[in-house]
C-alpha cells in the first residue's frame, strides 16, 4: 500500500499488513521456518535463512518505519537488544552523551557491559540543552535520550538537541517507548534514529518482548541489518506477528490511554495523600508548554509521591484493578515501584542524584473503564 500520505491509523493498519498474495489471508502469515528452499545455486526468492530475513519480520519492519517516518526499521529480540545493536555500531574510544534518567536497563548495559570495551558514557540532565552542548567532546558520536523520562517525566527538547548535534556530526538517538509514534515523532524533530521497546505500547498487550530501531539513513539500515545477521538477536516471526496485530489498534489505544491518563493525573493531583504528581499534561508541570509543542498527547505514564517506602507499599498491596508489576504500555493498568523495581540497578546514590525517592509510585494507565481505575486508586490510597 502506498501510504506516505495516509493518516497514522491507516498506515498502522495497512503498511506491511497487505493481504497474503497467495491465499488472500487478511492477517499476515507467520513464516515459521528456519530456511528457504533455493531453485539453483544463488537463485532464490529473496529469502535464504531466517536469521537474515523472514517475510513476517519484513512486514513489521516496513510498518514501524512508516509509523515513525524513517527510511527503514530493524527489529530485535527485545528493547535492550535493539539498544545494544545501536551501541554495537560504535567503536572503542567513542563517547556517548546520555540522559541522566534513562530506563534502568540502559545505563546498566552501557556501564556494566560496554564500558569494559572502551566506550565512554557521560550522563547529563538533557532537559537543559546547554548541558548536552557542554558534554559533547571531540570523540562524541552519539547523544542518547528518552523524553519524557522514566519515571520522573522530565522532557528534553528534541529539536533543540538535534540542532546542537547536527553541526558536530553527532547522532541523536531517541528512545520513544513512552510516547509511541502516535504522540511523538522524533525523526520529524531532527532525530537520527529512534528506538523502542515494542514490548510496551506498540505491542500493547503485555504478551511479548521486542525492540526496534528506526533509521533515517541507508548506512544505518545496512549496519543494523548486518548486526541482525552477524549477532543474531532477531525477533521471532511469532513475536513480529503479535506486534503487527498490536499496532493495528495503536491509534485507538493511545487515544484512550491519553484520555484516561489525564483523568487519573487530575484525580491524583487533587488527592490529599499524594504529595506530588509528575505528568506533562498537568498545567503545573515545569515543561507543560514544551509538552504541548513536542507531543500531540500526554500519554498514560504518571508518577506520584506517596512520601515513603512504607506508604508506597501500603498503597500497592491494596490495588485490585491495577496490577503491581514492572513494565508499562499494556491495555491493563500496571503500577510499579521504581526504587525497588525498574530503577533498583541504578543504586540508592544514583536514584537520589536524579530524584527517584522510595515513596515514588509509577502508573501506566490502561484502557479499562477509567472510573474503575480511579476508584481502585482511591481505595488503595486510603491504606496510607
Ligand atoms: C522497557 C524499556 C526498555 C527495554 O525494553 P525491553 O523490551 O524490556 O528489553 C527500554 N527503554 C524503555 C524506555 C523501556 O520502557
Image (cartoon, helix red, strand yellow):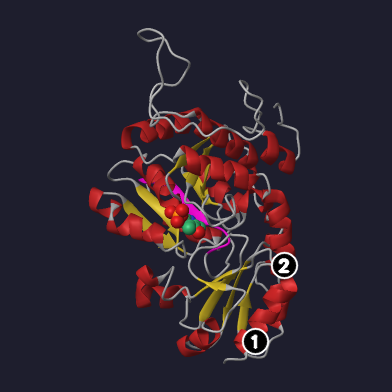
Q: Secondary structure at mark 1?
A: helix
Evaluate whether residue 265 shows in this view: no
Q: Which residues are magenta?
A: 139-149
Please check the rendered image and state whether residue 146 is part of the magenta-colored stretch, yes or no. yes
- Asked where in the image residue 97 lies, by quadrant, the reply is bottom left
Q: Is residue 335 above or below residue 75?
A: below
51 vs 302: above or below:
above
Question: Is residue 16 shown in magenta?
Answer: no
- Residue 14 coordinates in the image, percent (x, y): 69, 34
Q: Disc 2 designates what residue?
A: 260
Residue at (44, 21) in percent of width and height: 47
Q: Is residue 338 left or right of residue 250?
A: left
Q: Position of residue 284 (x, y in %)?
A: 70, 75
Residue toward you, 118 or 368:
368
The residue positioned farthest toward the left in the image shown: 116
Q: Residue at coordinates 41% horizontally, 75% vertically from top-left?
A: 340
Tell me where residue 246 appears, x and y as whole percent.
Answer: 61, 47
Q: CA distance from mark 1 to mark 2?
A: 18 Å
Residue at 41% across, 39% down: 234
Is 125 rendered above or below residue 340?
A: above
Tell whether label 2 touches label 1 (CB within 8 Å): no
Q: Main secondary structure of the magenta part?
A: strand
Ligand 1 neighbours mark 2 (CB distance < 8 Å): no
Amino acid at each position: 500500500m502506498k501510504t506516505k500520505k495516509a493518516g497514522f491509523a491507516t498506515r498502522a493498519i495497512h503498511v506491511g499488513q497487505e493481504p497474503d498474495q497467495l491465499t488472500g489471508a487478511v492477517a499476515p502469515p507467520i513464516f515459521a521456518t528456519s530456511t528457504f528452499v533455493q531453485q539453483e545455486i544463488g537463485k532464490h526468492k529473496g529469502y535464504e535463512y531466517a536469521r537474515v530475513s523472514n517475510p513476517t519480520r519484513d512486514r513489521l519492519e516496513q510498518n514501524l518505519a512508516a509509523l515513525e517516518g524513517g527510511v527503514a526499521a530493524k527489529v530485535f529480540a527485545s528493547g535492550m537488544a535493539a539498544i545494544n545493536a545501536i551501541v554495537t555500531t560504535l567503536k572503542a574510544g567513542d563517547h556517548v552523551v546520555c540522559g541522566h534518567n534513562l530506563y534502568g536497563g540502559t545505563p546498566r548495559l552501557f556501564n556494566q557491559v560496554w564500558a569494559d570495551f572502551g566506550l565512554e558514557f557521560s550522563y547529563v540532565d538533557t532537559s537543559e540543552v546547554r548541558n548536552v552542548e557542554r558534554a559533547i567532546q571531540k570523540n562524541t558520536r552519539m547523544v542518547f535520550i528518552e523524553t519524557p523520562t522514566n519515571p520522573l517525566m522530565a522532557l528534553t527538547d528534541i529539536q533543540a538537541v538535534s540542532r546542537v548535534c547536527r553541526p558536530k556530526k553527532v547522532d541523536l538517538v531517541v528512545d520513544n517507548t513512552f510516547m509511541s509514534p502516535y504522540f511523538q515523532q522524533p525523526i520529524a524533530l531532527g532525530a537520527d534514529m529512534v528506538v523502542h521497546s515494542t514490548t510496551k505500547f506498540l505491542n500493547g498487550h503485555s504478551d511479548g518482548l521486542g525492540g526496534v530501531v528506526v533509521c533515517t539513513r541507508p548506512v544505518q539500515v545496512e549496519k543494523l541489518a548486518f548486526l541482525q545477521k552477524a549477532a543474531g538477536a532477531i525477533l521471532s516471526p511469532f513475536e513480529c506477528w503479535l506486534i503487527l496485530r498490536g499496532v493495528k489498534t495503536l491509534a485507538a489505544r493511545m487515544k484512550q490511554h491519553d484520555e484516561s491518563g489525564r483523568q487519573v493525573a487530575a484525580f491524583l493531583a487533587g488527592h490529599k495523600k499524594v504529595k506530588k504528581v509528575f505528568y506533562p499534561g498537568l498545567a503545573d508541570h515545569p515543561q507543560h508548554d514544551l509538552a504541548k509543542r513536542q507531543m500531540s498527547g500526554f500519554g498514560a505514564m504518571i508518577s506520584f509521591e506517596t512520601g515513603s517506602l512504607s506508604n508506597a507499599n501500603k498503597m500497592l498491596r491494596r490495588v485490585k484493578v491495577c496490577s503491581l508489576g514492572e513494565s508499562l504500555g499494556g491495555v491493563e493498568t500496571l503500577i510499579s515501584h521504581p526504587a525497588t523495581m525498574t530503577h533498583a540497578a541504578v543504586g540508592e546514590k544514583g536514584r537520589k542524584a536524579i530524584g527517584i525517592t522510595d515513596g515514588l509510585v509509577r502508573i501506566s494507565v490502561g484502557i479499562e473503564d477509567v472510573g474503575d481505575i480511579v476508584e481502585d486508586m482511591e481505595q488503595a490510597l486510603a491504606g496510607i
